[in-house]
Image (cartoon, rainbow, N blue to C red):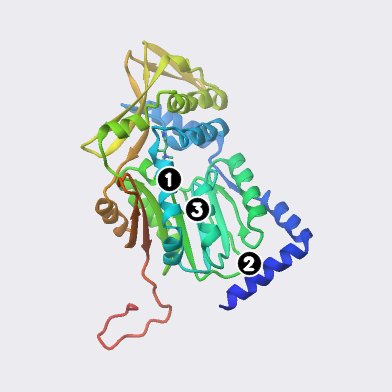
Amino acid sequence: MKGCRAQEMRAALHTAFEAEIRDQMRALTAIVNKAPDARTFLDDVVAGLSQTPKRLPSKYFYDERGSRLFDEICTLEEYYLTRTELTIMQQFAEEIAEALGQGNMLVEYGSGSSLKTRILLDRLQCTVAYVPVDISGEHLEQTAGRLAKAYPHIEILPVCADFTTEFELPRSKCTPSQNLAYFPGSTIGNFKPKDARRLLQRIASVCGSGGGLLIGIDLQKAIQTIEAAYNDRNGVTMAFNRNLLHRINRELDADFRVDAFEHRAIYNEELGRVETYLISDRHQTVTVDGATFRFEVGEAICTEYSHKYTIDGFHAIAATAGFSLERAWSDDQELFAVLHFRLPAIRLNTHKQIDGSTRED
Ligand code: AVJ
């Protein structure tokens, strides 16, 4: 492939001229910064605490400490999700890379530490650019820097943004054959089905015609396994959950007594989701930037939903955004699944075919 050769040459040039690598490293600091500002954070917190029952958006978990605690969760014995997804990615790496095709612009939603991405970047042919999108600026910068060093032949274009809002896709130097959205980690599970549909529609519009989506989803399973994953014995998930209150105290001039809120995560089988709460252990009032909120004894703030799906159930949701399921990979115990979807390729100048259809194949 022509693009391939060009890229090989570019890779060679990169090694030959270290100055260019330095240029690229410098370019990395020019991260597109569209993370929610303090005002949006305050508005969201006040709106959430004004509701009955009270809510806080889970996307605010990921400040620097929150991102670190989440990385720690991923290593916990009880938290089967990360290692299972990693196993699937490793076991089927070649198959997955082949299914995804070459010349992709790889856009990762919620890139975090981009650990699983390396499996793809190591095997995908002629990847034009890698666009990690993450809400945590510090985390993103570190990750992007490391990846730029490890993959000098791939353009790394980090975007600091809340991917539930519109963000502009950076332009790569080379034109990709298609865009490929990578949405691992069961992050989609944080969204209620209606919001998941809306987000998948956004992703579809970013992917465009013929684009692909590789997504990790956590599967429905025994309730004990699920609840253990969100109530670990070392209390890391509790610290992760409570950290949201520390963050609100620090960034929004609030006075939550963090230790007066207990962590609880329960699996709602009917709705197929884990619901995570912070529960007030006393009658108390909290002020956030001058606004007062009352808590009864045992009153809960819902901080997160983590939806669990069946492959068919998730396929039905993705289909509403135009995606069709190409392949599904799972582990022996069917704890987790990695699904590959594709959008139909629409030709620009559509000729009427003999049978009157306007679609390719
Ligand atoms: C990052 C949303 C996939 O829901 O399992 C882990 C976050 N919360 N433990 C999940 C989380 C508590 C995680 N996701």
Q: Can residue 167 be seen in this view?
A: no
Looking at the rendered structure, the kind of residue marked 2 is Lys
Q: Is mark 1 within 8 Å of ligand 1?
A: yes
Point out the frontmost of discs 2 and 1: 1
Which element carries disc 2, helix, strand or loop? loop
Residue located beneath label 1 in the image: 185
Q: Where is mark 3, residue-wise?
A: 108
- Residue 333 image-quadrant placement: top left
Q: Identify residue type, mark 3.
A: Glu
Vertical arrangement, residue 353 with respect to residue 72, above or below: below
- Residue at screen point 42% across, 32% down: 77
Name the residue tied to disc 2: 173
Residue 46, by quadrant, is top left
Q: Which amino acid does label 1 sit on?
A: Gly
Seen at 53% across and 63% down, the residue is 105
Q: Who comes first in sequence, dot 2 or dot 1?
A: 2
